[in-house]
Image: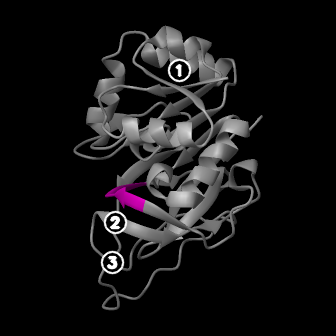
């Protein structure tokens, strides 16, 4: 089964493709929407500013339409990585408001790990943050952080609660629907680390940089039948 990694000039697609191959995938990197329409699985990586990544995606004639058809209508498994996950949101608020794909309700907002970070837990509670003056956290959030699993899902099969993943980001997804949350991490407050809805998955961290745990996640995605 062919797994397509979409090349829209966003950066880390080669390392993502290499990791997916190591996890057992038959992987093709492409910018052709016809390949997306015939793919069994689709991966959208992303590094950089939200608006630039959206512009790169829109610059591929027919690509957003192919994604809508294949992911939303045909229900093929989809994985967004880092900004690829953020593009699943309704909008990104980096240097203005820029529309996302609108697959996951919520906006992508700037990290603010200074005691006022707010996000939603699966129960809809506001996140508890560290008091001001007790934090030495910088933006971008860069490095290894623990994952707190919000619910069971085949994507995290064999992954223990508290596993570490590698993050590099300055913005995060503030969910409207807490039921879309799959995993969170703490960085001056609870922030979204992974989302899941129907046949769609997204991770804020980089599985291709997360060593054995990341390879296990990618293998789980390749075997997932939503």
Q: Image height check: is 63 above or below 47?
A: above
Can residue 177 be seen here? no
Please name the residue shown 69% across and 68% down the image.
160
Residue 199 spot, x, y in % from top left: 69, 34
Q: Residue furthest left?
A: 95
State how far apart marks 2 and 3 are (Cα): 13 Å
Tell me the magenta residue range: 167-172
- Is label 1 in a helix, a strand or a loop? helix
Please name the residue shown 50% across and 43% down the image.
19
Mark toward the start of the polypeptide (3 vs 1): 1
Secondary structure character of the magenta stretch overall: strand
Magenta-span inclusion, residue 168: yes
Q: Quadrant of residue 21?
A: top right
For the residues labelled 3 and 1, say whether their Cβ atoms are less than 8 Å apart: no
Q: Does 125 sit left or right of 18 as displayed? A: right
Checking the image for residue 141, the label placed there is 2
Which residue is labeled 1 in the image?
67
- Is label 2 in a helix, a strand or a loop? strand
Q: Does 87 sit left or right of 213 as displayed? A: left
Which residue is labeled 3 in the image?
114
Q: Nearer the viewer, residue 199 or 121?
A: 199
Q: Nearer the viewer, mark 2 or mark 3?
A: 2
Residue 166 spot, x, y in % from top left: 44, 62
């Amino acid at each position: 089964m062919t797994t397509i990694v979409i090349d829209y000039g966003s950066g880390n697609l080669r390392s993502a493709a290499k990791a997916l191959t190591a996890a057992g995938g038959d992987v093709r990197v492409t910018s052709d929407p016809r390949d997306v329409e015939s793919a069994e699985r689709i991966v959208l990586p992303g590094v950089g500013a939200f608006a630039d990544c959206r512009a790169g995606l829109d610059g591929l004639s027919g690509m957003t339409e192919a994604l809508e058809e294949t992911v939303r209508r045909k229900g093929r498994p989809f994985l967004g990585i880092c900004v690829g996950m953020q593009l699943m949101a309704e909008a990104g608020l980096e240097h203005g408001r820029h529309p996302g794909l609108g697959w996951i309700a919520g906006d992508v907002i700037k990290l603010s790990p200074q005691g006022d970070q707010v996000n939603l837990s699966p129960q809809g509670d506001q996140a508890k943050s560290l008091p001001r003056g007790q934090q030495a956290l910088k933006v971008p959030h860069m490095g290894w952080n623990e994952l707190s699993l919000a619910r069971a899902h085949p994507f995290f099969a064999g992954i223990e609660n508290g596993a570490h993943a590698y993050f590099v980001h300055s913005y995060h997804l503030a969910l409207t629907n807490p039921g879309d949350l799959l995993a969170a991490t703490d960085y001056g407050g609870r922030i979204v680390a992974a989302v899941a809805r129907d046949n769609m998955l997204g991770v804020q961290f980089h599985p291709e940089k997360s060593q054995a745990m990341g390879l296990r996640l990618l293998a789980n995605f390749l075997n997932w039948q939503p």
